[in-house]
Amino acid sequence: MPRNPHLSNVAYSFGPGPLTPAVRMLLYANIGMYVLSFIFPIVDYLGLVPKQVIEAQWLWQPVTYMFLHARNPTHILFNMLILWMFGVELERMWGTKFFVKYYFVTGVGAGLLSVAIALLPFEATRGTYNVNIIGASGALYGLLLAYALYFPDRPILMFLFFPVPAKYFVMILGAIAFITSIEGGGPVAATTHLGGLLVGYIYLKGGRGGGLTAEIKYRYLKWKMNRMRRKFDVYSGGRSEKARWDRNIH
């Protein structure tokens, strides 16, 4: 059927597409730990309790807490939805190695900040010293920040009905998660979420004239070039004989 030239070129779809390797493994790990938590009391040992990290030297907790979730299924469902929606695009752009590094830096960094804040001599923070922190939200807030920085104006269908620029979509999603964490998990979860945002921002913006910043810019330019090659059918071995010169010229 011939294409109607008056139809809009803009199309919307739900989700970022097929799973990427790291996102798939993180989904498996989180879901697997969620199931195990119903069989074994792993939350008591693998959740992040500042007192246990400081006094008992349970130094694995700032890592393992990221793979645990509350028994309420909405907690893990909401977190895994964010991981899929935003993590897939970032992993495609950065590559799996850098994506995994960023995910753990923001997640572990958010956990360590929560421990540090629990040591502050304030009434609001002293109560968090014995609280068990679980959830992937510290790392996920880092992903939300990165997505908003790289794709601020990309339209995303809010509630599957109307398009919203990614920067506002992430703000709304982050606000919802923030309010939910305060209502259900107290100030500790909010501290961990904000820690993920802070660590993510410092990690992405901390370099000057090289190092991390140069790597980010290189990967972004490489991703843009690959998109242009796919759009115009440019391959290292030249164009296919069946490709037309004006195929993608509008």
Image (cartoon, rainbow, N blue to C red):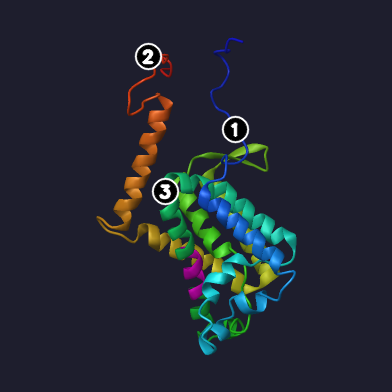
Farthest residue, direction left: 209
Q: Which quadrant is home to the C terminus?
A: top left
Q: Nearer the viewer, residue 15 or 194?
A: 15
The number of numbered badges drawn on the structure is: 3
| Residue that badge 1 annotates | 12
Image side of residue 31 versus residue 237, left or right: right
Q: Nearer the viewer, residue 231 or 166?
A: 231
Q: Amino acid at mark 3?
A: Trp
Mark 1, other Cα within 10 Å: few <14 / some 14–19 / many ≥20: few
Q: Quadrant of residue 75?
A: bottom right
| Residue located beneath label 2 in the image | 245
Query: Residue at (58%, 18%) from the top-left corner?
Result: 7
205 sits left or right of 107 in the view: left
Q: Few, some or many C-alpha atoms within 10 Å of disc 3 (few <14, some 14-19, many ≥20)?
A: many
| Secondary structure predominantly adopted by residues drawn in magenta | helix
Q: Position of residue 185 (x, y in %)?
A: 67, 71
